[in-house]
Image: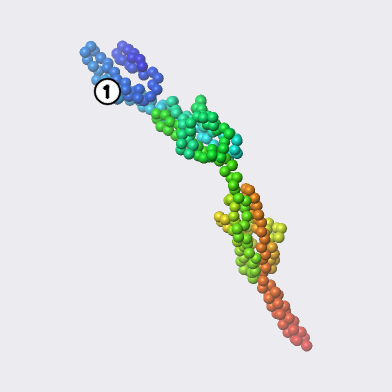
Amino acid sequence: MQLSSVTESTALDLGHVETLEEIQTVSCEVKSEPGFLSESACTEEGSVPLESANILEAAEHDFAPPSFLKKVDPSYLLTPGESAHLQCKIKGSLEIQVTWFKNNKEIRESNTYRMSFVNSVAVLDISDVKVEDSGSYSCEAVNDAGSDSCSTEIVVKGLFLQSLPASFLVKPENQQAVPNSMVEFKTVLKGTPPFAIKWFKEDLELVSGANCFIGIEGSTGFLTLYSVDVSKSGHYTCQVSNDVGSDSCTATLLVTGVHIYLFCVALILSVFCRALYRSYK
């Protein structure tokens, strides 16, 4: 700091102020005449004179808390032995302290973890990842004006080596139905979700629409057929899959009552034909 003097006034040049505390601890005494103390120039330690309020206001404006210009990627999917490179860019007034955490526990520099903060870019490198390196990672930036943080998830695919292939715990049952009724095939799945499910009639894949609905809720898959008729009779196959396998099973639908319907039609036609024949005799 430098005290400079001019003809009728005295100014204190604060120069480059690193922190607000430096401004707030400045005190001065200026004598306008020998033996007399200027009221407007005196301050108590820890306070700022009214004339210097604009200096403090400007310093507070310039002294910015850290924030992230670019956050670390939201997730990383890795295989054992790969390396992870976590990077983010931070802005704010110096000096900024950067700390990395795994599952809320501070990470220390080691052969596995390498950290740097150069030119506003914070980096965490993890070498030769293992299953136990999976977890939640966060970067925290702190200065005297505030703090900010961002986080990401690292998943090492070795966690899913025990995933089970999709298969059927309960298979759909064979069904019979009468014309114009609704039919629903249900199946209970097992394995590691998420599941993908498809239904086929013979070799034709079915799609949800006006005639049917295909759905899955949790581990239960179903096929609903609306207003069935004789053409809906046949073999229905359910195919289920996940990331590690697939399975299929088949059930049969028989639309009954068709023979009775045809018999009634034939009987009516027979009666009509007989009546018509008699009318000509």
> Which residue is at 51% across, 30% downward?
110
| In the image, farthest residue toward the left | 35
| In the image, farthest residue toward the right | 281
> Which residue is at 57% across, 34% downward?
84
> Which residue is at 35% across, 25% downward?
21
- State left or right for residue 256 relative to residue 126: right
Q: Quadrant of the C terminus?
A: bottom right
Quarter of image, res 207: bottom right
Q: Residues within 10 Å of mark 1 (few under 14, many from 20)?
A: few
Does residue 273 lie above or below 24 as drawn? below
Q: Quadrant of the N terminus?
A: top left
Q: How many marks?
A: 1
Can you give x and y, in whole percent of width and height, for residue 18 in the image?
Answer: 40, 22
Does residue 229 lie above or below 117 as drawn? below
Q: How is the image coloured?
A: rainbow
Instruction: Judge whether residue 130 can be spotted in this image.
Output: yes
Residue nearer the viewer, 41 or 222: 222
Can you give x and y, in whole percent of width and height, for residue 94 in the image?
Answer: 44, 25
Quarter of image, res 95: top left
Give amino acid for label 1: Glu
| In the image, farthest residue toward the bottom | 281
As helix, strand or loop, the secondary structure at mark 1 comes to loop
User: According to the image, label 1 marks what residue?
Assistant: 44
- State left or right for residue 109 relative to residue 55: right
Quarter of image, res 142: top left
> Which residue is at 64% across, 71% downward?
178
- State left or right for residue 65 relative to residue 223: left
Instruction: Judge whether residue 54 can be spotted in this image.
Output: no
Can you give x and y, in whole percent of width and height, for residue 177 in the image?
Answer: 64, 69
Does residue 21 lie above or below 177 as drawn? above
Residue nearer the viewer, 156 or 75: 156
Can you give x and y, in whole percent of width and height, for residue 251 in the image?
Answer: 66, 63
